[in-house]
Image (spheres, helix red, strand yellow):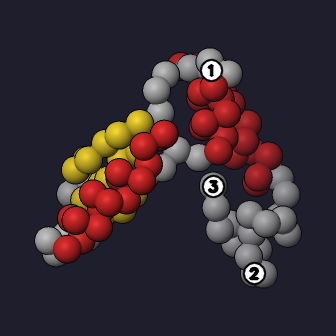
Amino acid sequence: MSLKVRVLDLGSGQVLFECPIVEADRAYEAAAGFEAMGLEVKVDMPSVNQSLASSLGIEGAPMEAFQESLAEEMDDHPGSCCFDEKGDKIIH
């Protein structure tokens, strides 16, 4: 699996630009160009966990199970770097 960095239009969710993760700088340049045109965009970068799983060849159902286990692990550790002072989850 080749991980991609995507530039998304915030209004429609449409993918405006996509490139391999090793060329992430191109996505940020494209995002700056879209913002200069007045569009509100977001750069969607694969997480470290997704990159690790992909490099290990994990795909399909095993990838879904891996993602679920990570979510469960974070849910079980309030007070960590994944939660703010009020106990609300800040990343997932």
| Residue at screen point 22% across, 65% down | 33
Element on which disc 3 rests = loop
Question: In terms of depth relative to the viewer, which is nearer, 2 or 85?
Answer: 2
Per the image, the residue denoted by label 2 is: 86
Helix, strand or loop at label 2? It is loop
Give 22 or 34, whichever is nearer the viewer: 22
Q: Earlier in the sequence, mark 2 or mark 1?
A: 1
- Quarter of the figure with residue 80: bottom right
Asked if residue 18 is positioned above or below residue 57 in the image, the reply reads below
Q: Amino acid at mark 1?
A: Ile
- Tell me residue 66's x, y (percent): 68, 31
Residue type at mark 2 is Lys
Category of crowding for the residue at label 1, using alpha-carbon neighbours closer than 10 angstroms: few (below 14), some (14–19), many (at least 20): some
Q: Can you identify the residue that label 3 sits on? A: 92
The amino acid at mark 3 is: His
Residue 88, above or below 52: below
Question: Is the residue 81 above or below the residue 6 in the image?
Answer: below
**Where's residue 22, x and y in %?**
48, 39
Q: Is residue 10 visible?
A: no
Q: Which mark is residue 58?
A: 1
